[in-house]
Amino acid sequence: MSKTKLFSFLILILVIIAGAFYFLGSKSEKSNTKPTQKLYVYNWTEYITSDLLRKFTKETGIEVVYTTYESNEEMYAKLKLSTNSNQPYDIVVPSNHYVARLIAEKLVQPLDLTRLQVQNVVPETLNLEFDPGNKYSIPYTYGFTTIAIAKSYAPNLELKSWADLWKPEYKDLVLLNDERDVFSMALKSLGLNPNATNEDEIKLAYQKLQSLVKKVKTYNSDAPEVPYVNREVETGMIWSGSAFRGSVDYDDIDVVWPEEGPIEFIDSFMIPVNAKNVDAAYTFINFLLQPENAVEVLKNLGFLPANNLIKPLLPESWQQSHILFPPKWVFERATFNRDLGDKAIEIYNKYWNLLRVSGE
């Protein structure tokens, strides 16, 4: 090979090597690029996995600033404060009765449903009394307050209704540490409106509950499946998501759908009126409406997403679970806790506090 050809060949090699380093360096810079936007999400504790948040940021370049609350009351109070702050929330996830309150107080903005994958949502969770036409909210998760039973601990129990819990053969109960759910259950057992605002009716429910609390071993809303798993209780109240979560590792837990109907809850995405990153909010909601991401919520957290497309993606045993997929009549007989206003809530608070004192 001549010196001229050798020199040209070496130059070509150097160019190729330099190009490779440039490509790798450029790729490294892209992978380390910081997100260009921030989305402020205010949601329930343990309502989305950190893996899903990272996946969202990787796919969109939007960083999620994620903070949590443990009650609707906490969310409501902080949301009202944040509307006048320099950095308001872009997404909140209230329960159904607070959806109605946020709409009434004009704390949230109307949704453009043409920008959302509404076709993915379970039809039974749409167009309900607290937001007709879903003008302001789109469901994220849903479930029911119902009756649970530890099958091996109490193999002969045959529960059919809320009223059965008062029968003497049913003992060692658990109640949710949830004022509205407990009173709704008692009012249903009396054949009364579970959203009663009349003090005489609320007092009747309190008096009926007084005879029940003598059998209550524990109040638990943090992880209501645990007393069943630990065989501390025979039956009582539970959230369907908690029942499913417990049944995955401990198949002794089952649920009974009461004849009077369970208490249904839906937690929904809403965009606050002063949200600064509305476009990113729509992107985030659509991300979680994708069935593959909704499945991850169920698998990791046990909460049932309001997604109509996830069933074929689940294990066969889960597809057959009547905890996850109750019969149609359950939806038809279910009632929602409504926003009753401050005056009625004060009455409930009074009798709830009396009840807890009497049960100690």
Image (cartoon, helix red, strand yellow):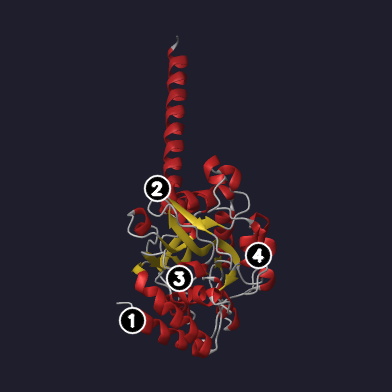
The residue indicated by pointer 1 is 358
Return the x and y of residue 330 as percentages of the image width and height.
61, 61
Which of the 4 image quadrants contains residue 288?
A: bottom right
The residue indicated by pointer 3 is 166
The residue indicated by pointer 4 is 332
**How far apart in space, not on screen, are marks 1 and 4 (Cα)?**
35 Å
Return the x and y of residue 244 as percentages of the image width and height.
47, 53
User: If you read the primary sequence from the N terminus, does the residue marked by circle 3 or circle 1 appear first?
Assistant: 3
Residue type at numbered disc 1: Ser
Callout 3 touching callout 4 (CB < 8 Å): no
Residue drawn at x 45%, y 60% is: 64
Residue drawn at x 47%, y 66% is: 41
Choose mark 2 or mark 3, whichever is in front: 3
The residue indicated by pointer 2 is 250
Which of the 4 image quadrants contains residue 100?
A: bottom right
Name the side, left or right, on which 9 lies relative to 107: left
Within 10 Å of disc 2 (Cα), the crowding (few <14, some 14-19, many 20+) is some
Callout 3 touching callout 1 (CB < 8 Å): no
